[in-house]
Every structure is written in structure tokens, then in C-alpha cells.
Image (cartoon, rainbow, N blue to C red):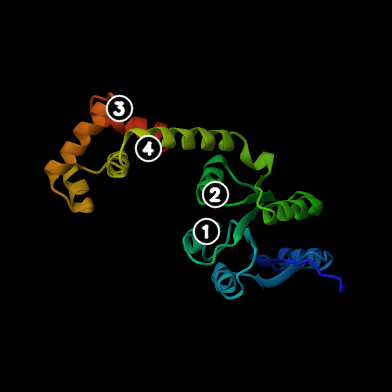
Amino acid sequence: MPEVTPRRIRLVLVDDHPLVLSGLQSLFAAEPDFEVVAACLTSGDGLAAIRAHRPDIVLLDIRMPDIDGFGVLRAIKGESVSPRIVLLTAEIDERATLEALRLGVYGIVLKDLPSESLLQCLRKVYAGEHWVEHRAVGRALATFMQREAARREISRVLTAREIEVVRMVAEGLSSVRIAHELHVSEGTVKTHLHRIYEKLGLDGRVQLALLAREKGIA
């Protein structure tokens, strides 16, 4: 029987530094299980390449001059094209790590890691695993997991509409503005708030806003 050639991992690379992009292309060219289908210097070109080539993985610099990595993540979230995203960055703080995890990235890799670590990361991501380099995480992963658990806890108590109201209260919106945003009457909003206070054992808006931020709902 003829030998079956294993399917290669198809990559789109997005980085605004030509030297970095060239180095990545050379790295993957030497690996038989990878294929670079597009290498892009702008996020706009990257988005077009993602939609045209439907890669398995996008290796994306988080800091881009036109659209940052988060903008790219938001642009393709919910589209029929859904490659796994790995962020490549020189540094990332806790807040950015939390946002990346929330938006569904599969990996975060620091640029000063050895090339072997990057290759290992992409192979694991292709296999369906997540890879977040420990130095990129710090306390972020623990915070993320705590917030996810808190969100699940809240969603068991409040309805989806009540959670929407909580989020708007945490953003500082008045009952009138919330009513306008939700296309309901102010009285309906006040009824929602009354039920929320009862369910959560709270006295008013200030406590609700503080709880929302603590639980990561805001």
C-alpha cells in the first residue's frame, strides 16, 4: 500500500517586524509537519489570509500597528472560520492575559522562548490542548478560573436578562439608560433590580456594582 503522508499543520503568521516574520518562516520551513500558507505584516492582511486560507493555527503578534491582537480575536470570533489562535508577544500583563483567555486564545508564547518551545506549543494546540507560558500568566490564570467559577455560580442564581442588568449597573448606567438600552420600561428595570437584590442578599446599587466587579461580571 502507498505510504500516507501525514497532514501538515497549516499556519498563518502575523507580525509587523519583517525580521521576525522571516525568522518564523525559516523555522517552520525546516519542520516537515508545518506549512506556512501566509505570512502577513499587518492585521488587515492577516484577517484576509485567515478567511481565504482557513488555517489550523494563527500565530499572532499581540502588538500590531493597525489592529492589535485582541481586535483580530474579536473580528474572527463567531465567524465560520475559526482557527486556533496563539499569541506571540515580548511581554503581557495580567489584565491582557485575562482578556486573551476570555476571547478564547489557545496559547500565549513569549518571544524570548527557545524555538523548540514554540514548536511544542503549536503541536499541542493543534492536538486540542492549551499552552500558556507560566511567565505570561502569573496570577492571571488563577484569577481567570476564579472568575469563571463565580460567573457560573451567578448564572445559577440570576437569569440571563438579570445578568445583563447587573453588567450595566456595574458600568454606571442609570435605570433610565438601562431601560433605553434593553428597550423596556424603567419600571421593568426596577423590578429586575429588586429581584436581583433579593436573590443576592444585597442592599442596593453600590453593593451590586462591587459584587459584579469582584465576580468578573463587569
| Image quarter hosting the C terminus | top left
Residue position for label 4? 155
Kindly report the distance in space between the C-alpha atoms of the residues bearing marks 1 and 4: 25 Å
Q: Badge 3 local density, few (<14 within 10 Å), some, or many (20+)?
A: few
Label 3 residue SS? helix
Type of amino acid under label 2: Ala
Query: Of label 1 and label 4, which has the lower sequence position?
Result: 1
Image location of residue 108, percent across then percent down: 64, 49
Query: Of label 2 and label 4, which has the lower sequence position?
Result: 2
Query: Which residue lies at the image location 37% right of the left edge and 34% below the top edge?
Result: 156
Residue 100, which numbered label?
2
| Image quarter hosting the N terminus | bottom right
Kindly report the distance in space between the C-alpha atoms of the residues bearing marks 2 and 1: 8 Å
Kindly report the distance in space between the C-alpha atoms of the residues bearing marks 1 and 3: 34 Å
Residue 73, which numbered label?
1
Image location of residue 188, percent across then percent down: 15, 43
Query: Of label 3 and label 2, which has the lower sequence position?
Result: 2
Q: Is residue 193 left or right of residue 39?
A: left
Residue 200, which numbered label?
3
